[in-house]
Amino acid sequence: MNAKHWLELELMDGGLHLAEGVRRNAAAHGYSKAELKAERKELGVKTYHQFDEDGATANWFWYLEV
């Protein structure tokens, strides 16, 4: 399976996925950061930066619009 197909399957449920978790899981499957970045752009993966009452958090999420 190539990185694009893997990422699409990973995000296909339409929910928010913690970006760092997706990156770790991709690395565990043998995909590089560069591959993941290229395929994320190819698929049109959206990002969401979490904020709380103190402002921006370290959490970024990825998702696919369904």
Image (tube, rainbow, N blue to C red):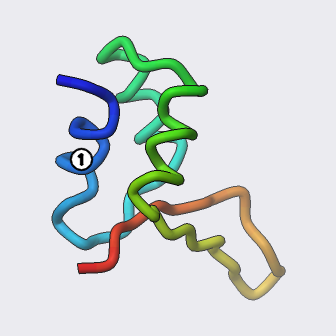
Indicate the secondary structure of the residue bearing disc 1.
helix
- In the rendered view of the protein, which quadrant contains the C terminus? bottom left
Among the 4 quarters of the image, the one containing residue 12: bottom left
Is 50 situated above or below 41?
Answer: below
Q: Nearer the viewer, residue 3 or 62?
A: 3
Outermost residue, top direction? Answer: 30
Is 16 situated above or below 20?
Answer: below
**Percent x, y of residue 28:** 35, 16
**Which residue is at 57% across, 73% downward?**
48
- Specify the amino acid type for callout 1: Glu
**Which residue is at 24% across, 47% downward?**
10
**Which residue is at 62% across, 59% downward?**
59
Is 39 situated above or below 15?
Answer: above
Q: Nearer the viewer, residue 7 or 56?
A: 7
Query: Taking 21 as reference, is 48 left or right?
Result: right
Outermost residue, bottom direction? Answer: 53
- In the rendered view of the protein, which quadrant contains the N terminus? top left
Q: Nearer the viewer, residue 41 or 59?
A: 41
Outermost residue, front direction? Answer: 42
**Percent x, y of residue 56:** 78, 73
**Which residue is at 51% across, 19% downward?**
32
Is 2 situated above or below 37?
Answer: above
Q: Which residue is mark 1?
A: 10
